[in-house]
Image: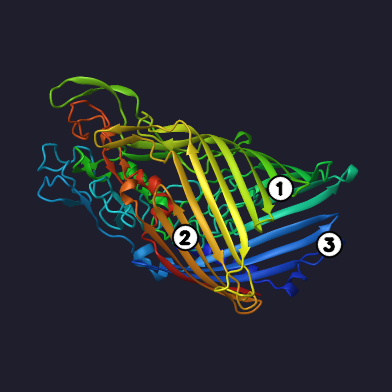
Amino acid sequence: METKLNTGRRLTLIAAALSATFATQAWGNDLPSMGEESSPWQVDVTYENHTVHREHAGLAKFRNTLQAELDKKVGDGWGIHSILRGSWDGVYRMNSSEYGKDAGGPIMLENISGVGGSFSVPHGGGVVNNATFPIPTNAFGFNLTANPNEGMRVLGDRWHATEGGVAFGVPVRPCDVDSRGCRDFGGYGKDGINGLEAPEFNKRFDFIRELYAKKTFNLADGKDLFLKVGKQQVVWGRTDLFRVLDVINPVDYSRNNIYDELSDIRIPMWIIQAEYRMGASDWMQDRNFQLVWNVDQFRANNLGQCGTPNVILDAGCFFRGMANLWDNGGTVANFAGGALATDFGPHQLGIRNVNLPAWSLSNTQLGAKYEGVTMNGLSFSLNALHYRSQLPSLHAFNYSPGELTNPADGSTTTVAKKMIAFDMHFPTVNLLGGSMDFQLPSVGAAVRMEGAMTWGEEFANSMRDELYSKNKVFRSVIGFDRPTFIPFISETSATLISAQLFYQHIFNHETQDAPFGKIGMVDWKDNFIGTLLIKGFLRNGTLSPQIIFAHDFQAQATAVAPQVEWNVSNDLKVTLGANYKLAEGRDRWKFDDCRACAPYTQFSYDPAGTVGANYGMTGMEPLGRFRAGPIGAAFKENDIFVRLNYKF
């Protein structure tokens, strides 16, 4: 737990940084001139309050954000651009029973066998590891004192019921209140209350959203070299919500899941960007070649710390719960024999290490893009990127063959040991792709297209001894944008209709039928996600209603997000909206949960007497989240919100 002194210093830092962002245009003129040829600072400051009420949870966000955007010419053609952003979210104090120091409590876990006299047991009361069952008490070394039944929730209880599958308790209080399961999972996962409520003020100085110097160097023959150096976002994509090419910067999904603009949730990195602008040729209107060198230390996507309102795929809770199991042991529902709640001791199940890539030249990331515009107006790009996956991969580390004894008859069998214990890795990935956009004058529409092939991505795979596989992946998207007059919306202004269809294909996809379900790769071999935006403009553009639909075809999950923006004045905008999810495919989300991966008959459902066989016992945990996707895994998180923006 932080000392009062450390807490005071952090609050002082936050106050100082937020005070610095209260700049005005006049104040900008008083900043250092930085040279005789420099111009005055251009400063824009905005304030935003975003308040969210969530069904069944109450207040889910009370975030107050100040952002200052500063620009200045400093002589010799150089310019400086910076965006500073600081936020404070009061939800952790205002709704502490759901997300703060009082969150969680004691839990009960399923024991569908009924052995021990109950179909549910408290955390720490597994019937395997209990004197009423033939296996002795504390046979596996679980100590309830080290992992008490308090401040917890059942893994996944916000989006599914256990329903005969595996589950375990997850600590949900901030890490300065309860440190169980807290790890650095790549820039998130171990924050206390201060870090959660003011996330930009950390060791990576995230309150600096952008800070770079830029200059255009004039070369011979009308060509230019554009250079941009500093903390920045590099935008390669042409799509919304989901990314195909736009993967240089990681994304902070903890801010508002997938529903904020990418410009607000990309995590800026320290990057050197050079662009050789070649201009026109005999058959091209314009040509550019760009090199991007991300020299920053590796940063993963922020998937959200367990116990916070936005934990995409509920992944942060799975990680924290598994890390806690490794450190302290715990009770796992319906594990032994596929039906008995089981107490495990430390260092038997869970996540052992998080292997974050250390900074080195070999771990920096390099990309190149050639783009052009043809004479008939078709814009295109060809892209290549060498980078680290921003999503983690879990590698089972104790899968080496070994001799095991069947306690039923004393026979021995050589099997691969596949107890569910992992190290987390972030593999190296290579990407090749391209994009294009063009106009269709005959229908008054614009078309956007992207495609990318990657090599080196890793996916959970219960058919492999190491419980993962490395696969090629193809992703693509086609977007269609058209302003259309819809009289019942507006007779004077066009309504924007924008549709997108995303596609993903995993090569060498592996699945296999087992007696009680499928085993292998949980991610869909082929999947489509469609989005549709309808946005109107009323009262000379001051009132803008819109609705967004997003549908995951394989998960059979849908999000509907209506909202109305009202520009009260040039400086004040108010937005009212909601976010509602529907899910019809919940039975499709269940997948092999690897209970039968364990190489002991008392743990594996083993009707054929084969030690260590995987019989495809299914449940939501741990793999169903990947079949449900970001929409399905949040289908109980229905929100209404109000957002206020004021520009000083």
Q: Are discs 1 and 2 less than 8 Å apart at CB?
A: no
Between the C-alphas of marks 1 and 3, the distance is: 35 Å
Q: Horizontal placement of 354 versus 228: left or right?
A: left
Q: Position of residue 67 (x, y in %)?
A: 62, 66
Q: Are discs 1 and 3 less than 8 Å apart at CB?
A: no
Asked whether residue 179 is in view, the answer is yes
Residue receiving disc 1:
379
Dot 1 amino acid type: Ser
Q: Which mark is residue 182?
A: none
Q: Position of residue 119 (x, y in %)?
A: 15, 50
Q: Residues within 10 Å of mark 1 (few under 14, many from 20)?
A: many
Dot 3 amino acid type: Ser
Displayed quadrant of residue 450: top right
Q: Residues within 10 Å of mark 3 (few under 14, many from 20)?
A: some
Q: Position of residue 355 (x, y in %)?
A: 47, 38
Q: Horizontal placement of 86 versus 391: left or right?
A: right
Mark sitting earlier along the chain (1/2): 2
Q: Which mark is residue 196?
A: 2
Mark sitting earlier along the chain (2/3): 3
Residue receiving disc 3:
38
Dot 2 amino acid type: Leu
Label 3 element class = loop
The relative height of residue 303 versus residue 339 in the rendered view (above or below) is: below
